[in-house]
Amino acid sequence: MHRVLGLLLLIASFGGGWLWMDYRDFQRTPLQLPAGGAVYVMPPGGSAASLASDLVAAGYLPARRELYLRWMAWSSGRSVQLKAGEYRLEPGLTASGLLDLLVSGKVVQYPLTIIEGWTFRQLRAAVREHEALRRTLDGLDDAAVMALLGRPGEHPEGRFFPDTYLFPRGTTDADFLARAYKRMATVLDEGWRQRVSGLPLKDPYQALVLASIVEKETGIAAERPQIAGVFARRLQKGMKLQADPTVIYGLGEAFDGNLRRSDLETDTPYNSYTRTGLPPTPICLPSRAAIEAVLSPAAGNELYFVAKGDGSHHFSATLDEHQRAVTQYQRRRASTL
């Protein structure tokens, strides 16, 4: 009898020792992830038990070690701290590292870049097409979208800050737009408080309108303060802005890529050749640089500019000088055709 008991104790001791050694190996051994890593979605209300089962089913964890993961989560207190979301699992990740990741809530972040100079229509298209955003705005017109964002009656053009935004899967399109709206409001408010004196602008919204025109007039950052200075001086003198981008915006879908003299002569609320002052709304989403240029324009006496054909502009102080520059660069463009 004593021999039997001794044998059983020896077997139990051996078995317990083997289990402990195997558990220690489990703690050190990375999960069996694909070479490129994997994505795991922890559902709301998910548990350590469901996590372990999912890993076994995916082939990331041997079935005999499923209970080890559950014990590790329970004994460390992490089983009640797991956060729902989509997680990126990188090669080399251990079971303990996985639990830490799910406790941290560092879910996969998806990018969406709002491009400087986009219209709100282009922004809505990009938001609608992003596969990680949850669509709640389909079927709503722009006015309804702004009302949903808590800004009823506001025109949406220009109100959303161009930048790259990161967000987890399942973020709503409305929440994304609200974030970009708030960012633009902050940038505009900060810029307005730091503006130079003597500007022909009554409020931050007028600055936003003018910044959108500057944004569309040039893609060269160094020219923005110069162009802003030209427009500021023209506004101060009561001159028409005569900015082609405002005319194009006013034409809407009727614009076919070719701006004609008849377009410049056709009056719309956005035609700055037929109307003085600023158009009623921005014409695009302006960058921070364009906003800063409008609120701190370059000093000078230039009132005109003409495209050189290489993306840059020639600036003139008088109409005669401007007309000569127009003739010069028109001839240059004609000679290259």
Image (spheres, rainbow, N blue to C red):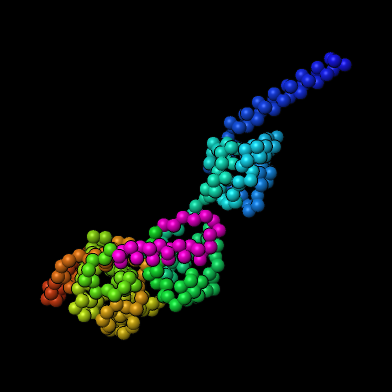
* 279 relative position to 65: left or right: left
The spot of residue 50 in percent (x, y) is 68, 46
Residue at screen point 44% across, 77% down? 153
The image quadrant that residue 260 belongs to is bottom left
Name the residue located 73 percent from the left edge and 21 percent from the top edge.
14
The question of residue 38 being in magenta is answered with no
Q: Nearer the viewer, residue 272 or 72?
A: 72
Q: Residue at x 23, y 79 (%)?
A: 240
Instruction: Give the prevailing secondary structure in the magenta stretch.
Output: helix
Q: Is residue 51 visible?
A: no
Q: Position of residue 323 (x, y in %)?
A: 15, 75
Q: Is residue 164 left or right of residue 9?
A: left
Image quadrant holding the N terminus, namely top right
Q: Is residue 254 visible?
A: yes
Determine if the magenta segment contains residue 191. yes
The quadrant in which residue 186 appears is bottom left
- Residue visible at 49% across and 56% down in the picture: 167
Q: In the rendered image, which quarter is residue 114 located in?
A: bottom left
Total number of numbered discs in the rendering: 0
- Give the magenta-colored segment's residue range: 164-193
Looking at the rendered image, the quarter that the C terminus falls into is bottom left
Judged left or right of residue 16, residue 237 is left
